[in-house]
Image: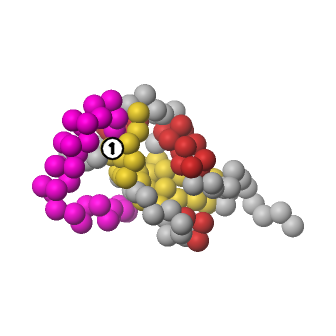
Amino acid sequence: MSYNFEFNNIDLERRLNTYENIKNKYPNKIPVIIEFEKKEIFKNITKTKFLVEDSYTLSKLMYNIRSNFKLDKSMSLFCLVNGQILCNMSDMVLNLVQKYGDNDDHFLKLYVMTENVFGNLI
């Protein structure tokens, strides 16, 4: 099963222009599209486009998302590359782009979801 990113609905030429502008302005950063699972806990997150340092690991990116959006520390986040590949959190974002980046528009697309893996306290 593959996730269809809303960003893909934008015209390819416009996405390529956006990518070129970003790379010209920020050559050491990677443009990442992050879409969040449609759940109550993510309802206030409207930002989907991020610029990430090329030295970041996936775990550091997830930590920043958790911190910036004030998500509960007990909540387990899962990140799927291209909406279908669960990668190691120690993978470098730059390596993920090279391995799984979109060949059409060069963006790394991540789908973030949560699952209750810690159980419920009674």
Seen in the picture, residue 97 relative to 105 is either above or below; the reply is above
Residue at 21 percent of width and 35 percent of height? 24
Q: Is residue 27 magenta?
A: yes
Quick one: quadrant of the C terminus?
bottom right
- Highlighted magenta segment, given as a residue range: 1-30
Estimate the x, y position of residue 88 in percent, counting from the top left. Answer: 50, 38
SS majority, magenta: helix
Frontmost residue, 67 versus 116: 67
User: Label 1 amino acid?
Assistant: Pro
Frontmost residue, 6 versus 17: 17
Q: Is residue 106 left or right of residue 114?
A: left
| Residue farthest to the right, as pictured | 122
Seen in the picture, residue 2 relative to 67 is either above or below; the reply is below
Count all numbered tags in the image, as a single digit: 1
Quick one: quadrant of the N terminus?
bottom left
* Element assignment for label 1: strand
The residue carrying mark 1 is 31
Estimate the x, y position of residue 66 in percent, counting from the top left. Answer: 59, 49
Residue at 40 percent of width and 57 percent of height? 48
Q: Locate residue 92: give its quadrant.
A: top left
Q: Is residue 17 magenta?
A: yes
Q: Residues within 10 Å of mark 1 (few under 14, many from 20)?
A: many
Frontmost residue, 85 versus 92: 92
Residue 95 appears in the rendering? no
Frontmost residue, 7 versus 83: 7
Residue at 19 percent of width and 42 percent of height? 20
Estimate the x, y position of residue 116 in percent, counting from the top left. Answer: 66, 61
Residue 54 appears in the rendering? yes
Seen in the picture, residue 103 relative to 99 is either above or below; the reply is below
